[in-house]
Image (cartoon, rainbow, N blue to C red):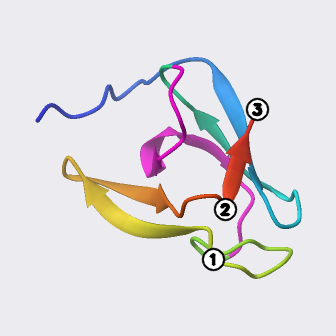
Amino acid sequence: MAKPNKKGPTKTVDIFCVACNCLLFKYRKGGKGALVKCFKERISQDHTLAPCVCPKCQKPFARESLIRGLPAYKFIGGKVWFK
C-alpha cells in the first residue's frame, strides 16, 4: 500500500477525550470520514503527557501501532471526538 502524504492536509481538527472533554491533539486530518487512526507525523500539537492516555482523567483512548509502515495511534471506539 502507498504511504500517506508526508506534508498532509492543511486543515487541522481538535481531538478531545469523550470522558472529560480534555484537548488531546491538534491533527492535520484528510478527508471527511470518521476518525479511526492518527499518524504521529501529522500531529501538529500534542497535549498528552503519556502516549495514548488522557492527561486529565488518565483513561486510555488509543493503541500505538504501525499502519502502512508508519507509527500511528489507533483510537478505541467511542473514546475520542473531534471538531
Q: Are marks 2 and 3 in contact (CB under 8 Å)?
A: no
Is the residue marked by circle 1 packed among few (<14), some (14-19), or many (20+) residues within 10 Å?
Answer: some
Q: Are marks 3 and 1 in contact (CB under 8 Å)?
A: no
Q: Are marks 2 and 1 in contact (CB under 8 Å)?
A: yes
User: Residue 60, which numbered label?
Assistant: 1
Q: Amino acid at mark 2?
A: Lys
Start-end of magenta stretch: 32-49
Quarter occupied by residue 4: top left
Q: Tell me which label, 2 or 1, sits earlier in the chain.
A: 1
The Cα–Cα distance between marks 2 and 3, rounded to whole angstroms, is 14 Å
Q: Which residue is mark 3?
A: 83
Total marks shown come to 3
Left or right of residue 7: residue 34: right
Q: Residue lying at the far front in this picture: please name it.
A: 78
For image coordinates 33% across by 65% down, the residue present is 65
The Cα–Cα distance between marks 2 and 1, rounded to whole angstroms, is 8 Å
Is the residue marked by circle 2 packed among few (<14), some (14-19), or many (20+) residues within 10 Å?
Answer: some
Front-lying residue, 13 or 75 = 75
For image coordinates 71% across by 46% down, the residue present is 81
Q: Which residue is mark 2?
A: 79
Front-lying residue, 7 or 21 = 21
Q: Amino acid at mark 1?
A: Pro
Q: Where 32 falls versus 13 (above or below)?
A: above
Quarter occupied by residue 3: top left
